[in-house]
Image (cartoon, rainbow, N blue to C red):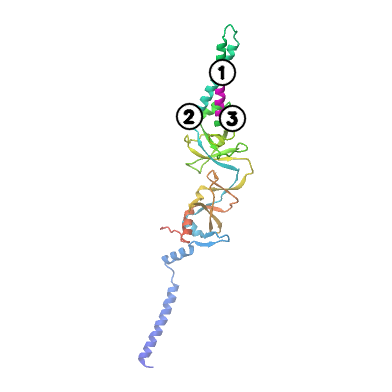
């Protein structure tokens, strides 16, 4: 072999041996912090899959859950009394005052004229003329009819209990002083209940997450010709709600209670015009589920059925972002 060729082949062999040594040397070197961080992020990236029902399941390992600050809680089991959803408003005390004033004025006039007629009837014919007696009879008849008409209207508008109740003056005093709010709840037009509701949860439209309990005060009989609805009046103690404010009433009616759970307010998120929660359905697995918010409860919403899974109360929006981005969760720098 000629010396130049030998030299070239020797050089190639030496280069190949050096490349092999460099390769193993690099492989043997520890990873830099940047490399380790990149690998950690890749390993902890959320994973998406579909379960047997077609629901999207997002998987987050413990490290990612901690980094995202996720917090979960178990919904509280509860019983739900059947109820009817209705609407109403807080009664202005002046309206009730005027109605009671009209009723009592008509009552007083009827009683006064009736007593005067009875007094004149007991007088001898020498002391009272037939004309005066007839005038007194006419007056008492008029006042009695006026009272009957006023009472019928009051009963129609406010119910029998407020019309006949001995505690009407006490109720008026508490409503006027602001100690108690009087709330009128109307059934949908044309509908009636076979029996008065057991009680009512009343929710102001300004804050639908909180409800107050109302005590049944009075019930109108049948359907009001003007409103075409049956009305119920409830008393709510120490409730600073503005007179005339619109409310939603949930009338508790007789029937077997439903079983379910109370989902906390913090667990609920709004997405695409619907309401959702994230339930932990496995080890590090979370599934987004749609829920209905038609049964507000104290500090949450009642959900029918057995929801034993923990639900996310902190970080649900972050999981939604990761799901929407096909598993790309926000980082600390996002």
Which one is earlier in the sequence, the residue at label 3 or at label 1?
Answer: 1
Label 2 close to label 3 by CB (< 8 Å): no
Callout 3: 10 Å neighbours few (<14), some, many (20+)? Answer: some
**Separation of residues labelled 3 and 1 (CA atoms):** 25 Å
Q: Mark 2 = which residue? A: 94
Near-viewer residue (197 or 138): 138
Q: Position of residue 318 (x, y in %)?
A: 47, 55
Residue found at the very far left of the displayed protein: 4
Q: Mark 3 = which residue? A: 160
Residue found at the very far top of the displayed protein: 126
Which one is earlier in the sequence, the residue at label 2 or at label 3?
Answer: 2
The local secondary structure at tag 1 comes to: helix
| Residue drawn at (41%, 82%) of the image | 16
Magenta highlight: main SS: helix
Q: Mark 1 = which residue? A: 140
The local secondary structure at tag 3 comes to: helix
| Residue drawn at (55%, 20%) of the image | 142
Relative height, residue 314 to residue 157 (above, below)? below
Q: Position of residue 33 (x, y in %)?
A: 42, 65
**Magenta range:** 141-155
Let me know if residue 9 appears in the view: yes
Q: Position of residue 2 (x, y in %)?
A: 37, 93
Callout 1: 10 Å neighbours few (<14), some, many (20+)? Answer: many
Of tags 3 and 1, the one toward the viewer is: 1
| Residue drawn at (57%, 19%) of the image | 141
**Separation of residues labelled 2 and 1 (CA atoms):** 30 Å
Left or right placement of residue 197 versus residue 326 in this view: right
Q: Dividing the image into 4 quarters, which one contains the N terminus? A: bottom left
Residue 139 location, quadrant = top right
Which one is earlier in the sequence, the residue at label 2 or at label 1?
Answer: 2
């Amino acid at each position: 072999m000629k010396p130049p060729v030998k030299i070239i082949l020797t050089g190639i062999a030496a280069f190949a041996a050096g490349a092999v040594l460099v390769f193993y040397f690099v492989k043997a070197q520890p990873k830099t912090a940047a490399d380790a961080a990149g690998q950690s992020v890749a390993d902890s990236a959320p994973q998406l899959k579909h379960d047997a029902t077609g629901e999207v399941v997002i998987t987050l390992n413990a490290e990612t859950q901690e980094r995202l600050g996720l917090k979960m809680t178990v919904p509280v089991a509860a019983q739900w009394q059947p109820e009817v959803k209705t609407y109403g408003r807080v009664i202005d005390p002046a309206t009730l005052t005027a109605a009671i004033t009209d009723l009592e004025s008509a009552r007083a006039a009827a009683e006064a004229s009736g007593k005067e007629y009875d007094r004149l009837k007991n007088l001898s014919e020498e002391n009272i003329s037939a004309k005066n007696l007839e005038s007194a009879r006419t007056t008492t008849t008029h006042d009695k009819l006026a009272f009957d008409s006023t009472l019928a209207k009051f009963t129609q508008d406010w119910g029998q209990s407020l019309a006949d109740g001995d505690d009407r003056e006490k109720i008026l005093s508490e409503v006027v002083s602001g100690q108690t709010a009087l709330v009128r709840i109307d059934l949908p037009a044309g509908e009636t209940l076979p029996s008065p509701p057991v009680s009512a949860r009343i929710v102001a439209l300004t804050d639908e997450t909180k409800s107050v309990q109302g005590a049944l005060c009075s019930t109108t009989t049948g359907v009001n010709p003007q409103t075409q609805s049956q009305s119920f009046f409830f008393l709510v103690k120490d409730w600073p709600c503005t007179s005339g404010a619109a409310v939603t009433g949930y009338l508790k009616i007789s029937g077997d209670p439903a079983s379910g759970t109370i989902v906390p307010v913090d667990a609920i998120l709004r997405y695409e015009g619907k309401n959702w929660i994230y339930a932990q359905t496995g080890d590090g697995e979370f599934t987004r589920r749609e829920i209905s918010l038609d049964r507000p409860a104290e500090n949450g919403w009642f959900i029918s059925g057995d929801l034993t899974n923990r639900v996310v109360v902190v970080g649900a929006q972050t999981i939604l972002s990761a799901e929407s981005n096909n598993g790309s969760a926000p980082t600390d720098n996002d």
